[in-house]
Amino acid sequence: MLYASANDWQQASRKRVLLFGMSGLGKTHVSNILRGSGDWFHYSIDYRIGTRYMGEHIVDNYKREAMKMPFLADLLRSDSIYIASNITFNNLAPLSTYLGKPGDTSKGGLAFNEYLRRQEQHKSGEISALLDTAHFIERAKDLYGYQNFVCDSGGSICEVVNPEDPNDPVLTELSENLLLVWIKGSDAHTDQLIQRFNKAPKPMYYQPDTLRALWKEYLGENKIPESKVYPDSFVRWAYKRALANRQPRYQSLAENWGITVTAEEIAAVTTAEDFNALITRTLESH
């Protein structure tokens, strides 16, 4: 690890961490606290994916929908209007909307093959955004003078790396430049996340083999063709299974490449000093 002991962390003039874990457990919240202190640069993997690597796909999708409306189509053809994605660190809806949900197209779903294509685009973008981290560490220092750096990773990081492979190129690159910190949720947190997701289902990334297996199981269990699947129903059904599938991958990632803090500990962080103290305690007991 970049910091082998609590003393290494305390004495480091440049503190650099990557937060990972299930969405909704505090990665962005803590990153915002650190950025708000004025001493930390906040690098969001999902924001980078949605701007640098999938921004054109997202905007083209908007334009495709706009071209279905004669009034807007004429304006677009004459360059009279401009369509852009207003993605932010705290509003990743443009990226989620583009990823979409498989199912009945008349209810806002995507054909399964198109859904797979967009998933693959996301995987490629996520790997690239993760590998951009070292560049942004130096960019933050050289351009803005930030010594400290927090990488706010997406919930799907465990899907695009192999934590069991000691030579995984992405994890090797990351671990040489940052301390990897898993925010571990409890069973109660999982239940809360599932309840929250059921109220407002959002797209997420799955490994292709996992996704195909889930899709096949769902179609067989409900005895319906692909074209009749209600998109929200499928993603609700798949979400709990996806969380269960990710948990051991997160744990392996933390055991082999980083350290673990709990969601409760993260919830208690209100200042950058609190965060530094938490990492110190965790490294002392690691």
Image: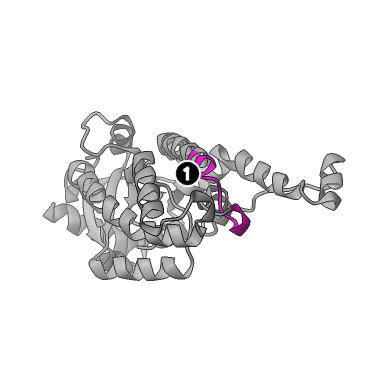
* Residue nearer the viewer, 34 or 211: 211
Quadrant of the rendered structure where residue 22 is?
A: bottom left
Q: Position of residue 98 (x, y in %)?
A: 57, 48
> Magenta span covers which residues?
105-116
Residue drawn at point x = 16 percent, y = 47 percent: 5
Q: Position of residue 228 (x, y in %)?
A: 52, 56
> How many discs appear?
1
Label 1: which secondary element: loop
* Residue nearer the viewer, 40 or 226: 226
Q: Quadrant of the N terminus?
A: top left
Asked if the stretch drawn in magenta spans residue 224, the answer is no
Residue 57 appears in view:
yes
Residue 14 appears in view:
no
Residue pointed to by mark 1: 145
Residue drawn at point x = 27 percent, y = 68 percent: 264
Amino acid under disc 1: Gly
Q: Main secondary structure of the magenta part?
A: helix
Residue drawn at point x = 71 percent, y = 44 percent: 64
